[in-house]
Structure formats: C-alpha cells, structure tokens
Image (cartoon, rainbow, N blue to C red):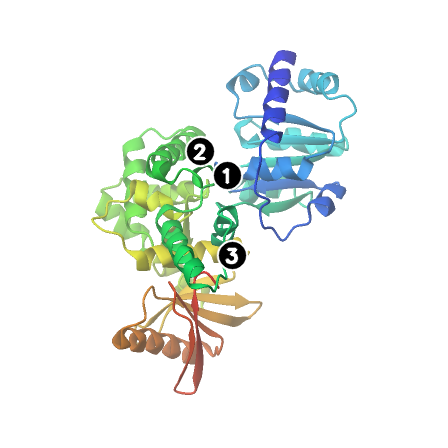
C-alpha cells in the first residue's frame, strides 16, 4: 500500500508542475479551504475537476489519493491507508480524494473522516453523488463546486484573445474561435490539439458510457444503452419522451428507457429540459428537450450529414446557463405558447419568470427575424416577462416591436 501511495505522490507532484489556466468560478478557493465542510467538485470526466482541486491546494500541505487506480482499489484497507498517508505526507492539513465514487461505500468512509476532523477536497464524475449518496449520509456537511468543460470566455483566454475584441483583425480571429468552439467544444486537453478532438471525444464518450454507466449499474444489454446514447447525441436540442424513445429504439419497456435516461445524466453526459407550465403535473407529462454537455461530442458521435450551427449554438447557450448555476428542476425550462410558438429558455427566479432567451444563429434574413421575434413576444405576453434576449452568432442590436424591447446579443458577449 505504501508503494501505491508513494507512486500517487509522484503523480500528484508531476501534475502540480504543469501550467494550467485558472478557471472562472464564483467560489473563493481560500474561503472554501478555510471551511471544515467537505469540498465536493463534480462534473464530467476530463473536464478539469482534478486540476481545479490541485489549483485550490497548490502551496498547501495536502495528501492525495486517486481512486481511478485499480491497484489502490484492489488493495483497499482504510486503516492501512490512513497510516500510510501519515507516513508519506507527515502533518498534512488537507486530503484530496480524486474520483472517489469508484470506491464502494465511499460515502460512509468519507463521513467517518469528516467526523475525525479531516479537511477534504473530493472530486467525482457522477451526479448521483449529490442526489442520493451525498444527500443521505453527508447531508449538510459539504459544499458543491461544479466544473464543466471550458466556457467560451475561458477558450478565448487560453488563446490570448479578448472575447470583446473590437479591431477588424481581432474580430475576424474572434469569429474563427467562436466557430471552432461551437464545432469542437471546450474539453481542456483538446484546446491545443484541435485536429484530435473527434478521435479523443469519441473515445471519451465510450469510456464514460462504460465506466460510469455500464459498470456502475451492472448493465447487461450494453447495445441498447449505446443505441440510446447515440440517438440522444444525434437528436440534441430536440424534444424526447420515454414512450417515443421506447418505440423508436425497440427497448424492452418504458421503465427501462427511463432508467437509461437517468443513467446517462448521472455522469453529466446529457441534460433534460422540461417544458414550463404552472401546473407541475402537466409539466411532468410534456416531452423534455435533450442537451449534451459539450458540442464536441456531437461532432464525434452524432449521426449527421451536415453541421447544424443553429442547434450547436442553442446547445452552447444551454450549457453556459447551467455553468451559471441554473437548475433544470427549478430555474430553467423551455416553453410553448397556446399557438405552439416556442422560446428556447425560460429563466426563473423564485416565483416569477426573470428572462426569456431565444437562440438564432443568423438573423440577417427579415423573415427569420420576424419569426423569432414573433415567437418570443407571444411567449413573453403569456408569461408576463419583459426581459427578452436573442442570442446570435455575431449580430448585436436592439429591436423594438409591438411595445417590446428585444436585446440581440452575439454569443461572445452573452
């Protein structure tokens, strides 16, 4: 066990020696570390959770365990591990546990460490950590930090370009970066290797399905699960229902479909957006729209004959809203009016609608502008909301129509 921990210390030190981009976050690292509550960093695999934890702890005396290590899991003995950590990291103040969900009954062990006063930063790639395991054994004992792939502004920062560039040459470069980001996404390891994105994300997608879904839930019929994942990736930004999916994919039952949908959300791979309705029962019955955590997965896995930049832009706006803390259960929805006009995103705050956000890649055509504004205004009247936004690829202006003011904003400024 000591050799395993010593080898992981070398791994930790090598990771700390690398150059990283400081990620944008609303959380103050020092404030988090000063709290005795468990710091839980969650998000999809390879999105930068471990890096964020290392950056938080850089310069501190901290011990490190990486549970993406089969030798550690095979030799697991908690008493021996704690003794060896004291030997390898004498007097450590913090304990970093990476991908801790791979350890059976990890929540009970972490709860015991918490009771013994260990100041922990833990990472995990599974939303179930919050919904059940964290919420039961560790209720009230943790603070959550959610990490997603690079945002557009972080992508610009890595490429040393101002996202609000105004000079002609800079604007041309900025638009090229926006288009690149919409197609290839923001996974950190691929920011400097854009030609390898498709191959890398194809492998990562399959790895997430296998490690975080199939193995975790002991799924036998992996073909059905893979077919559903491919179907969702190919139909991103579209409404889906369990009944239709069951019929289209020939699955055994609607219950199986619902379980698979939940399993594919757990590792932060897919999100499902409910249709807004004041009546909860009606909202639960309506089809949900499906979104994917990173646009690069669409290029890598979706069955498509051409780029659909409009859907890629919509997906990116959705992920940006999730990054800002909007919750698909409480504060973000889509909406269809009584005349079947649709607005992409309804943003709610407490008990009122705060803003409506429509997404349209190109509004240079007057007919397109009329259609998008008409849908937005009709939904605004039904929802009694006057904060109206249309996000585009590069258009910026203000539209006044029928007594409503609509802010048209390019994605780089959104």
Query: Above or below — where is 326 with respect to 142?
Result: below
What residue is drawn where x is 36% and y is 54%? Answer: 179
Where residue 396 sits in the image (x, y, percent)? 42, 71
Where residue 282 sits in the image (x, y, percent)? 39, 65
Q: Is residue 220 left or right of residue 59?
A: left
Quick one: SS at disc 3?
loop
Nearer to the camera, 40 or 182: 182
Q: Which residue lies under the disc numbered 2?
A: 212
Where residue 322 sits in the image (x, y, percent)? 50, 55
- Tell me the CA gap for discs 3 and 1: 34 Å
- Tell me the CA gap for discs 3 and 2: 37 Å
Nearer to the camera, 402 or 384: 402
- Tell me the CA gap for discs 2 and 1: 7 Å
Q: Is residue 69 left or right of residue 97?
A: left
Q: Residue furthest right?
A: 91
Which labelled disc corresponds to residue 126? 1
Viewport quadrant of the N terminus:
top right
Q: Residue furthest bottom?
A: 403
Q: Closer to the observer: label 3 or label 1? A: 3
Number of disc labels: 3
């Amino acid at each position: 066990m000591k050799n395993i921990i010593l080898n992981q210390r070398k791994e930790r030190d090598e990771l700390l020696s690398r150059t990283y981009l400081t990620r944008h976050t609303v959380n103050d690292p020092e404030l988090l570390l000063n709290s005795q509550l468990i710091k839980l960093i969650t998000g999809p695999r390879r999105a930068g959770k471990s890096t964020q934890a290392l950056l938080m702890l850089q310069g501190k005396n901290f011990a490190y365990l990486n549970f993406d290590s089969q030798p550690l899991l095979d030799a697991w003995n908690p008493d021996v591990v704690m003794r060896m950590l004291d030997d390898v990291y004498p007097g450590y103040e913090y304990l970093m546990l990476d991908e801790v969900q791979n350890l059976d009954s990890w929540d009970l062990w972490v709860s015991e460490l918490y009771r013994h006063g260990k100041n922990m930063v833990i990472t995990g790639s599974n939303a179930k950590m919050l919904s059940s395991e964290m919420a039961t054994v560790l209720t009230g004992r943790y603070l959550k930090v959610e990490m997603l792939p690079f945002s557009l502004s972080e992508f610009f920062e890595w490429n040393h370009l101002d996202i609000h560039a105004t000079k002609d040459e800079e604007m041309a470069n900025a638009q090229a970066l926006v288009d690149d980001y919409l197609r290839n996404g923001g996974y950190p390891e691929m920011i400097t290797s854009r030609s390898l994105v498709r191959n890398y994300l194809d492998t990562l997608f399959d790895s997430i399905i296998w490690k975080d879904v199939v193995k975790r839930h002991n799924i036998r019929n992996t073909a059905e699960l893979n077919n559903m994942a491919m179907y969702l990736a190919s139909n991103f930004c579209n409404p889906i229902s369990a009944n239709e999916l069951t019929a289209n994919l020939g699955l055994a039952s609607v219950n199986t479909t619902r379980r698979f949908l939940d399993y594919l959300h757990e590792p932060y791979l897919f999100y499902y957006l409910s249709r807004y309705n004041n009546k909860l029962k009606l909202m639960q019955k309506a089809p949900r729209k499906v979104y994917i955590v990173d646009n690069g997965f669409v290029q890598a896995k979706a069955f498509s004959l051409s780029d659909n930049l409009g859907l890629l832009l919509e997906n990116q706006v959705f992920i940006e809203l999730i990054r800002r803390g909007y919750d698909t259960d409480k504060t973000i929805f889509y909406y269809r009016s009584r005349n079947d006009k649709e607005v992409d995103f309804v943003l709610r705050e407490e008990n009122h609608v705060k803003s409506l956000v429509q997404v349209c890649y190109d509004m240079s055509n007057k007919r397109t502008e009329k259609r998008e504004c008409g849908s937005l205004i009709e939904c605004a009247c039904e929802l009694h909301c006057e904060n109206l936004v249309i996000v585009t690829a590069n258009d910026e202006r203000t539209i006044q129509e029928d007594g409503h003011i609509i802010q048209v904003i390019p994605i780089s400024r959104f």
